[in-house]
Image (tube, grey):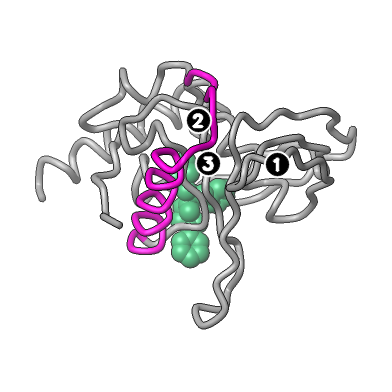
Amino acid sequence: MAIREILTVADAAPVLKQKSLPVDKVDDELRALMDDMLETMYAAPGIGLAAVQVGVPRRVIVMDIGRDEEARQPRYFVNPEILWASEETLPYEEGCLSVPEIFDEVERPARVRIRYLNREGETIEEEAEGLYAVCIQHEMDHLEGVLFIDHLSRLKRERAVKTVKKAAKAA
Ligand code: K1U
Ligand code: ZN
């Protein structure tokens, strides 16, 4: 397993803006990518990561929204789809490892029904709510080349990118 570089809007905005392609097969090569992504996410630290954030534009996500470091609960999503989204919405203060140190409120459907392939390539259908629903929608946006700051006003978005670029230059 290896920790990979997480791309940010300061250095790789065009990569992050591209639409990720579907995965053909869940095999050992894909599982190795997901293991690297998980290690990268835990090290950051973060609660989710899309493959495009490490420069691989494929429809793959890893996540662990658990708070217990001793009892990790990693989740793996390959080719995820949203089958249904609730009318009810949930505002949540989001962050993104590709837009470091910027946090702002985004309102999304409170519950979603999703279908995806798991680490073994089995089809799973389930309903997500709370932080799980927030995080899967945030990560699925990445697969479409959309960042959480794209849900904010133009002023806030431009200010966020400027702040991240300034911090990267200073580092
Ligand atoms: O960049 C990413 O996609 C990961 C992002 C996921 C996310 C966070 C909050 C709302 C929606 C999606 C992060 O993990 S940002 C870091 C973060 O939220 C966090 C880090 C350590 C502990 C707890 C949270
Ligand atoms: Zn993100």
Q: Are marks 2 and 3 in contact (CB under 8 Å)?
A: yes
Q: Where is the N terminus found, in terms of image quarters?
A: bottom left
- Residue at which label 1 appears: 122
Whole-angstrom CA distance, mark 2 to mark 3, is 9 Å
Q: Amino acid at mark 3?
A: Ile
Between 37 and 87, the one nearer to me in the picture:
37
Q: Residue at x 69, y 36 (%)?
A: 116
Q: Is residue 32 left or right of residue 123?
A: left
In terms of sequence position, does the residue under pointer 2 or pointer 1 come before the other? Answer: 1
Label 1 crowd (10 A; few <14 / some 14-19 / many >=20): few
- The circle drawn on residue 102 is none
Give the prevailing secondary structure in the magenta stretch: helix
* Residue depicted at 76% across the width and 55% down the height: 130
- 4 w.r.t. 69: above or below: above
The range drawn in magenta is: 20-44
Q: At label 1, which amino acid type do we have?
A: Glu
Labels 2, 3: front one: 3
Identify the residue at the far right of this view.
87
Q: Where residue 81 appears, x then y in whole percent?
A: 71, 28
- Whether residue 167 appears in this view of the structure is yes
Work out whether mark 3 precedes mark 1 in sequence or the reverse, and give the earlier one. 3
- Residue in view at x 55 percent, y 53 percent: 63
